[in-house]
Image (tube, rainbow, N blue to C red):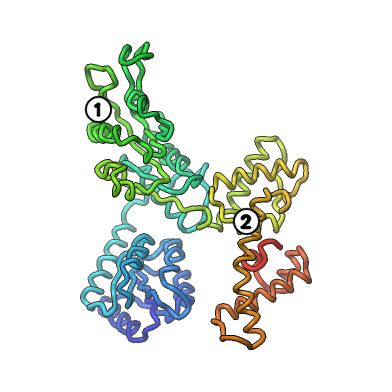
Amino acid sequence: MKILVIDDDADIRATMESLAVRMELTCDTAASLGEGLAKARCGGFDVVFLDVRLPDGNGLDALPVLKGLPASPEVIILTGQGDPDGAELAIHGGVWDYLVKPSPLRETMLSLKRALQYRQEKNRAQSPRPIQLSSLVGTAPRMRQCFELAAQAAGSPASVLITGETGTGKELFARAIHDNSPRAGRPFVVVDCASLTETLVESTLFGHRKGAFTGADCDRDGLVKLSDGGTLCLDEVGELPVSVQKSFLRVLQERRFRPVGAAHEVESDFRLIAATNRDLEEMVARGAFRQDLLFRIKTIHLVLPPLRERAEDIRLLAQRRLEDLARAAGRPAKVMDSEFLMIISAYSWPGNVRELNNVLERAMVAAGDEPTLFALHLPQEVRIAVARANLTRRAPEEGEAASARAGEGPLPSLKIFKEAREREYIERLLRECGQDVGRMIEISGLSRSHLYALLKKYAPGA
């Protein structure tokens, strides 16, 4: 077994190397975040001890990178900061443990032993069956974690709660979990809780018998019964009326319910997947959602990231959407100009993937028969938002950078100074090369991905 220690304290590195020798482990060390990530990317590490405050960055910011690596290592945070919020962030990031320096050697050894034992058992255990991702797109580390959890959920009968902002694809994930589960051949029934009226919600969910109320002219099965043998998807479960939550809790526990006006109960063997963009914990705190119901629906919790937190997926999502639109229209797929791509990559996408899909369709319509999508084909509100964000960000940076160039004012941080020089270089590169990306790469010696990243950062509207 092999461990990596990323810590700028030489004494800590020496102590951990000594501990590794005692435990007959192989140990490598790094004094900076950059050096540590470079070694981690080479692979082969089972556990990484990660400091928070490092000379070149915050260790917590590197968690998505470490967890996104193939055969990602277990991570133990080892820091001098007794920070509850930091611990919460670390645990959300998937760390194994959070130890505060100076941590007793016995405690450190015990945490390491448990992490190694967990890793050995996880490697011996059969991996979840790969999930079929025909409708899901993403390569960002957080999305890969979502795919892994969805694969686990597909192989389990447990209830699933999917949370995320509007437009992040909650129903797509629910459908993918169902389609990859043993219930795939049975019904997938979606209930839009936001559209249920309080007077008819019980009838809609549980069904009714003829004559139960005015207008009930025949027996009708509810959606819970229609999902028998399959999956019941409660979309926007946070909108479920409080008056119905108690009734539905019993249905979850017993899988039995009484249709409105019926004398006897009926059964339904369904698997529950719930989805919401609401904060159910906050709703519980103010009495708008039952805590016991939350416990029942949250056995597996899948949190979908907003699009702005996985910007590296935007190009892939856009290509897939353009191909789908072209196929539906019976036309060749359009090509995205580099400026078009830079703008959609820089936009914040408050409506997430749903908004991206809508904007791409509008751009397709605006382009007509033209084979290439240019920035002018994008809606004005998108271009204006990106331009405003760029100008707002650039103003204070340019003031500090100008002072640094003139040797006036307070000395800026090294980061500000380096960014000012990078901006100057990119602006001159654009002046000399225009939109010729190939020539930019030839002159700068940058890779295409690195060049696009710098253009996005310093000249998103170029």
- The percent coordinates of residue 289 (x first, y second) are 30, 42
Dot 2 falls on a residue whose secondary structure is: helix
Q: Which mark's residue is nearer the viewer, 2 or 1? A: 2
Residue type, numbered disc 1:
Arg
Q: Which residue is mark 1?
A: 256
Please give the name of the residue rendered at 59% of the width and 44% of the height, measured from the top-left corner.
357
Dot 1 falls on a residue whose secondary structure is: strand
Please give the name of the residue rendered at 54% of the width and 51% of the height, measured from the top-left corner.
350
Residue 185 in sight from this viewpoint:
no
Seen in the picture, residue 211 relative to 237 is either above or below; the reply is above
Question: Which of disc 1 and disc 2 is earlier in sequence?
Answer: 1
Please give the name of the residue rendered at 74% of the width and 44% of the height, measured from the top-left corner.
367
Pick the quarter of the image with the C terminus: bottom right
Q: How many marks?
A: 2
Which sits in the foreground, 431 or 284? Answer: 284
- The percent coordinates of residue 84 (x first, y second) are 31, 67
Which sits in the foreground, 21 or 447? Answer: 447
- The percent coordinates of residue 61 (x first, y second) are 44, 68
Q: Residue 449: which quarter of the image?
A: bottom right
Q: Which residue is mark 2?
A: 385
Q: Residues within 10 Å of mark 2 (few under 14, many from 20)?
A: some
